[in-house]
Image: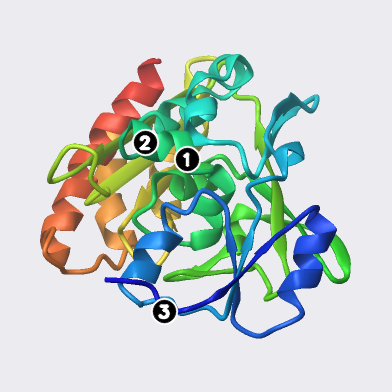
Amino acid sequence: MIPAPFDYEVAESVEHAVELLGEREDTKLLAGGHSLIPLLRLRFARPAVLVDLGRLDALRYVRDAGEGLAIGALTRHHDLQHDPLLQEHCPVVSHTAGLIGDPQVRHRGTIGGSISHGDPASDLPAVLLALDAEFVMNGPDGERTVPAAEFFRGVFETALGPQDVLTEIRVPKLGSAGWSYLKFTRRAQDWATVGVAAVVRRSNGTIEQAAIALTNMGPMPVRARTAEATLRSADDIAAAAEAVAGESDPPSDVSGSAEYRRHLATVLARRALGEAVTR
């Protein structure tokens, strides 16, 4: 299907993009386009104006920021996958980026576009939620930072205001922490039917910190807090995995029923936690 007519603008800076977003109602940002363009073609999205961020190369980077790493919002998945800083300090992000779509998608899609889209079936939002990442955005009132736990609000809903532009993602350095991201797909390169992200820190042989987040198990990425507490207190992977299913509200669709997804989440959580604990 052909998209509905729209006007097209090219942002020359983040400030210019914020200005363009405020000029007309129903204006959308275009980053990599792999989330938005299919919606345009199906006419599920019918914006009056598209603002293209593609020329803002200043938003493509991975930088050492001391205790963490700073990632520009327009950094492409392919670059995340192969970035040496991420591979050394936060490898769960580079690993997950390499699982997204196919090479065409990874060469065009961006981390900021994936996060801003707010699709509960996307891989990186759950991983960033497990990492307690922070998102930096610019709007008409200047810059603000929102933690991942407060950013995702619902299906395709985020903390971004109508004139906000996501500019940077901040993730911690994992050091000796173990990590894993596993997902199940019906077909190769498909959206995740279910995904599980896990980050585990041990100290003197006991689990000191644990973070578990779920993909496509609710209207937004889900943090499995009860399962985390179970793992920390009992050091029991099986018990923690069983707790995961009760902390979600998965959909039923062509990819599987809610009951099927709960079973998958339990299986994947057990495997992901096993990887994270032994890594």
Q: Earlier in the sequence, mark 3 or mark 2?
A: 3
Tell me if label 2 and label 1 are in contact, CB under 8 Å. Answer: yes
Residue 57 shown left or right of residue 49 in the figure: right
Residue closest to the eye, 276 or 11: 11
Identify the residue at image location x=41%, y=61%: 37
Foreground label between 3 and 2? 3
Q: Residues within 10 Å of mark 3 (few under 14, many from 20)?
A: some
Q: Is residue 100 left or right of residue 134?
A: left
How far apart are labels 2 and 1 at the CA level?
A: 6 Å
Q: Quadrant of the N terminus?
A: bottom left
Q: Horizontal and vertical percent for residue 184?
A: 20, 41
What secondary structure is found at the residue carrying circle 1? Answer: helix
Residue at which label 3 appears: 4
Q: Quadrant of residue 64?
A: top right
Is residue 139 visible in the rendered image? The answer is: yes
Image coordinates for residue 245, horizontal then vertical, percent: 25, 56
**Position in image of residue 236 (x %, y %):** 31, 33
* Rendering coords of residue 209 (x, y %): 54, 34
Helix, strand or loop under label 3: loop
Element marked by disc 2: helix
Q: Which residue is mark 1?
A: 108
Residue occupying image coordinates x 32% and y 40%: 101
Of callouts 1 and 3, the N-terminal one: 3
Image quadrant occupied by the C terminus: top left
Task: Reply above or below: 271 against 205.
Answer: below
Q: Are marks 3 and 2 in contact (CB under 8 Å)?
A: no
Mark 1 Cα-neighbour bin, 10 Å: few <14, some 14–19, many ≥20: some
Task: Looking at the picture, tell me which residue is in the foreground, 41 or 91.
Answer: 41
User: Is residue 238 visible to the viewer in this orientation of the structure?
Assistant: no
Where does label 2 land, which residue? Answer: 104
Q: How far apart, in angstroms, are the residues tagged by discs 1 and 3?
A: 23 Å
Q: Between marks 3 and 2, how big is the CA–CA gap?
A: 25 Å
